[in-house]
Amino acid sequence: MDFHDLKVFCDLIESGRFSRAADLNYVSQSAVSQLIKKLEDYYDVKLLERGREQISPTAKGEVFYRYAKELLHEFGQLENELKPTGEVSGLVKVATVYSLGLHEMSHYVRRFIKRYPEVNLHLEYQRTNRIYEDCLKNVIDVGVVPYAASRPQLETLSFFNDRLVLVVPPDSPLAHRRKVAIKDLDKQRFIGFERDIPIRKAVDKIFRTEKVNVEYVMEFDNIETIKCAVEEGFGVSIIPELAIREEVKAHTLVAIPFSQAFYRPVGIIYKRGRSLTTGAMAFIRFLQEEGKRQPAMK
């Protein structure tokens, strides 16, 4: 047994899925299953309860997990202490929402990797609630989320503010407007995010504050489907400006600023008190620096 075995076991407990633990460690699900069997045979105990949807640790599995996490934490601190001063390296597991990951984060990731080629950065896309869960469970190192919420166990840092715009098809009566007021959306057919997504809650709050009543005709959990529905003429929508650049350039959609600016704040989260690799700490500093250099977004 080595530290990689401990990490795989902890990832399995924290994610609850063999497939997830396999993806996080770049191994097959079969390899994860074989590792668990090896551990159970070695200690002659049952470590996991296997349910239909997720696995969970037995009482002995909880004990093994607790000590394994402590050992991994101590080993991480040891590596950080022994590495040459100034060396930036290590695995960095980052999660963000689809709209940021598809349209904005790739730019930052490319620049970061170019600056720190020794860092192994793994970026994945998840829904916001899953990012918080994975951060608290140490499945990921860093989360990049809109409307970052303060939580006792998490550090929350500002990244940048993403302007919200009205998105309409080119043949819409609003398409030739230079700016629109939020009240212009009253009675409009509207395509929104699903109700548990933070940007939907923020947009609904704007509508309530301005006493605007839109007709929700469609609700989706991702920005790409929303854009497609607007292109097809089913309604209008409000989305972050940076996520619509390609469609505006291709003239398939029109983005119109609001006369009163609205923004989607984007934040950085990581678990409080966790010992991060030099690569993870460098990535957090890098994002903060990049955010400060983009006054046009704020």
Image (spheres, rainbow, N blue to C red):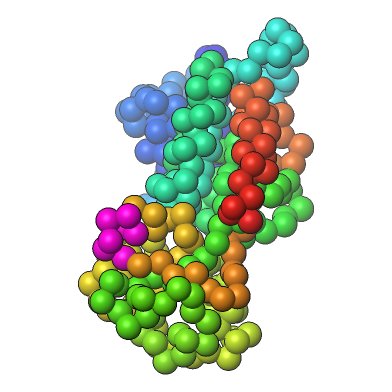
Tell which residue pokes out farthest to the left in this image.
Answer: 232
Q: Nearer the viewer, residue 147 or 175?
A: 175
The image quadrant that residue 232 belongs to is bottom left
Q: Is residue 168 above or below residue 51?
A: below
Judged left or right of residue 68, residue 229 is left
- Residue 9: where, in percent of width, then height? 51, 30
Q: Is residue 254 above or below residue 25?
A: below
For the magenta stretch, what is the residue range?
247-253
Image quarter (top left, top right, bottom left or bottom right) of the C terminus: bottom right
Q: Say which residue appears at 66% left-offset and 22% top-offset.
A: 278
Judged left or right of residue 157, residue 280 is left
Q: Nearer the viewer, residue 180 or 110?
A: 180
Question: Magenta stretch: residue 252 in it?
Answer: yes
Question: Magenta stretch: residue 161 in it?
Answer: no
Q: Say which residue appears at 66% left-offset and 13% top-offset.
A: 87
- Residue 65: where, in percent of width, then height? 61, 33
The reply to whether residue 207 is in sight is yes
Q: Nearer the viewer, residue 198 or 259?
A: 259
Judged left or right of residue 253, residue 263 is right
Q: Say which residue appears at 46% left-offset and 90% top-offset.
A: 186
> How many marks on residues?
0
Q: Is residue 105 above or below residue 186?
A: above
- Residue 58: where, in percent of width, then height? 55, 41
- Residue 208: where, in percent of width, then height? 59, 86
